[in-house]
Image: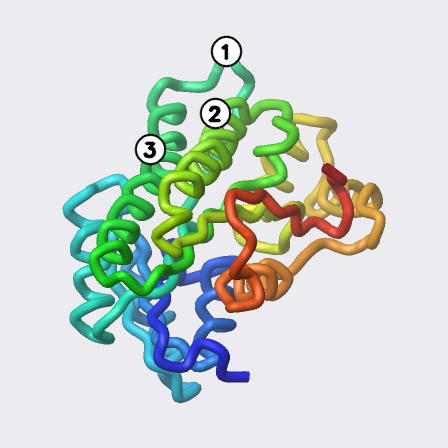
């Protein structure tokens, strides 16, 4: 399919995991893709997409820095002449008992996950309104935006914040032809979930490598962990014309783990 031919898509946290799967899905459907990441490997990720024939650019960007965010969207418009879709995927997590959770970790998590989403949405909306073509904003929340989990109050707070931001912006920009939605992934096979398996596993019962993940997967009605492509497929739908009348929503992609 080439649903997004001629369209330009920005994906933050786009160099690996869910972000790279999202970027790859848009690239496969004809989009020009700008991958942003705080990690310098982002250009290698973009190069990998270009090897498939896609138009892709990697930009080192700290989403907590408004100047860096402006520069990211400057690249999108300079390289491809327009901005159509912005996917706010950059995120971090740490795990700690409440008495051990540092203010530094609290601030960093809210800065990347919530403030970073706000800054990217703000910049994207500014440009979409100016262009007058409408657009799509898609924010990556989490199952923890539905149900906060033990030892991660800062992460849960940051993702509940993403959902609130999504709803508020959706109401503000609806008449501009811009939709704003969020996606709540569940257990997805990524580097982050490898970290979660290892650290939560030690804190929740001295699980061995992979054992905690395996036990949680048994609680999923579909009995499998998700893959990046599962999240990317939903995001591609929300960015398409088929989702013209969907805004302000938070949609789970978790195999039925949370049904609400």
First in sequence: mark 3 vs mark 1: 1
Q: Is residue 230 above or below residue 145?
A: below
Q: Position of residue 50 (x, y in %)?
A: 36, 82
Q: Marks 3 and 1, how far apart in space?
A: 21 Å
**For residue 80, side relative to residue 18 (left or right):** left
Q: Position of residue 155 (x, y in %)?
A: 50, 30
What residue is rendered at 51% in x and 30% in y? 160
Please tell me in which quadrant of the rendered image residue 66 appears. top left
Give how far across and how far down residue 252 sits, in percent: 65, 46
Q: Earlier in the sequence, mark 2 or mark 3?
A: 3
**Cα distance between the residues tagged 2 and 3:** 11 Å
Task: Point out residue 181 in the picture as x, y percentages from the top left corner.
Answer: 50, 48
User: Which label number is shown at residue 111?
Assistant: 3
Q: Secondary structure at mark 2?
A: helix
Q: Is residue 56 above or below residue 175?
A: below
**Which residue is drawn at the image coordinates 27% and 40% (left, top)?**
64
Between residues 259 and 202, which one lies in front from this camera angle? 259
Q: Which mark is residue 165?
A: none
Residue extending farthest front? 175
Q: Quadrant of the C terminus?
A: top right
Q: Judge by depth and name the residue closer to the eye, 42 or 238.
A: 238
Lower sequence index among marks 2 and 1: 1
- The residue that disc 2 covers is 154
Q: Circle 1 sits on which residue?
A: 99
Element class at badge 3 = helix
């Amino acid at each position: 399919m080439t649903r997004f031919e001629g369209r330009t898509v920005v994906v933050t946290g786009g160099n690996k995991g869910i972000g790279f799967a999202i970027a790859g899905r848009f690239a496969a459907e004809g989009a020009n893709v700008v991958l942003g990441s705080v990690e310098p490997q982002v250009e290698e990720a973009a190069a990998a997409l270009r090897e498939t024939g896609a138009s892709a650019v990697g930009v080192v960007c700290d989403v907590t820095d408004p100047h860096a965010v402006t520069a990211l969207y400057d690249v999108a418009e300079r390289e491809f002449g327009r901005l159509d879709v912005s996917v706010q995927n950059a995120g971090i997590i740490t795990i700690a008992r409440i008495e051990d959770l540092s203010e530094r970790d609290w601030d960093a998590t809210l800065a990347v996950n919530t403030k970073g989403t706000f800054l990217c949405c703000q910049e994207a909306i500014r440009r979409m309104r100016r262009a007058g073509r409408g657009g799509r904003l898609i924010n990556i929340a989490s199952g923890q935006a539905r149900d906060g989990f033990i030892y991660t109050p800062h992460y849960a707070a940051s993702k509940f914040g993403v959902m609130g931001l999504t709803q508020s912006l959706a109401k503000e920009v609806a008449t501009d032809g811009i939709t704003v939605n969020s996606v709540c992934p569940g257990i997805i096979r990524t580097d982050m979930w490898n970290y979660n398996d290892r650290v939560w596993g030690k804190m929740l019962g001295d699980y061995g490598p992979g054992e905690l993940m395996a036990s949680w997967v048994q609680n999923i009605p579909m009995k499998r962990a998700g893959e990046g492509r599962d999240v990317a497929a939903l995001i591609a739908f929300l960015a398409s014309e088929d989702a013209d009348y969907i805004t302000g929503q938070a949609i789970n992609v978790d195999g039925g783990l949370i049904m609400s």
